[in-house]
Image (cartoon, rainbow, N blue to C red):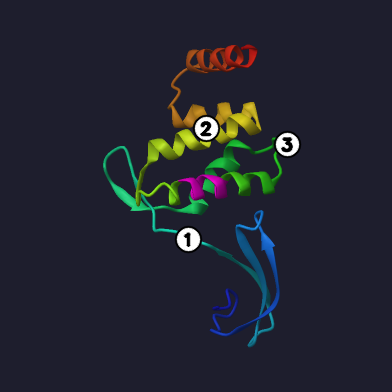
Amino acid sequence: MRCPFCGHSDSQVKDSRPAEDGAAIRRRRQCESCDARFSTFERVQLRELTVVKKDAQRQPFDRSKLERAIETAARKRPIAPEEIERLVSRIQRQFETSGDSEVSATRIGEAVMEGLKRLDSVAYIRFASVYKDFREAKDFEDFVGAVQAAREE
């Protein structure tokens, strides 16, 4: 593994432990050249996923992009980083095991909304406001009204 500090190509694993509910392995490494320490994560990847955007453009699935979007929606909310990691892992696993190598951005957005709905209603509404492209306050009112009606049922 290349050192992120000096670029040396060899590093030594100092510690390994499960992470993300066993979906990944966290490895503590030390560079043999500059002695800097850093962490890496190893995850099982069942298949290469391609995201099909609304404009039919295709790009490789980027786990970190999904993670950033969820973290943005959950900013300053009482959601532990581990819960976000579990949600991202669950969504990624769901699509990797679906049998399709291509997944639409719409399906990913719906999966995120479903996950956030269970975690935190404010993060859910924040994500929905971007995902559903709210244009005015009325869009928020309508959506929040629908969320409250669903809760009361």
Q: Is residue 22 above or below residue 133?
A: below
Helix, strand or loop for the magenta stretch, by majority: helix
On the image, which quarter does residue 19 sit in? bottom right
Distance from disc 1 to disc 3, alpha carbons, whole Å, reads 30 Å
Q: Residue at x 56, y 41 (%)?
A: 70
Amino acid at pointer 2: Met
Q: Is residue 113 above or below residue 94?
A: above
Residue 56 is drawn in which quadrant? top left
Q: Position of residue 26 (x, y in %)?
A: 65, 66
Mark 1 secondary-structure assignment: loop
Relative to 41, is 70 above or below? above
Residue 78 numbered tag = 3
The kind of residue on which mark 1 rests is Gln
Residue on which disc 2 sits = 113
Earlier residue among tags 1 and 3: 1
Q: CA distance from mark 3 to mark 2?
A: 17 Å
Instruction: Verify CB contact (< 8 Å) between mark 3 and mark 2.
Output: no
Task: Report the residue at 51% width, 13% height from top.
Answer: 142
Q: Please rate how many residues cluster around mark 2, counting C-alpha atoms within 10 Å: few if below 14, some from 14 to 19, many from 20.
A: many
Q: Are marks 1 and 3 in contact (CB under 8 Å)?
A: no
Q: Is residue 39 magenta?
A: no
Q: Residue furthest left?
A: 56
| Residue at 56 percent of width and 84 percent of height | 8
The magenta-colored residue range is 88-94
Crowdedness of circle 3 by 10 Å Cα count: few (<14), some, many (20+)? few
Q: Amino acid at mark 3?
A: Pro
Residue 39, x across and y down, in percent: 65, 69
Q: Which residue is mark 1?
A: 45
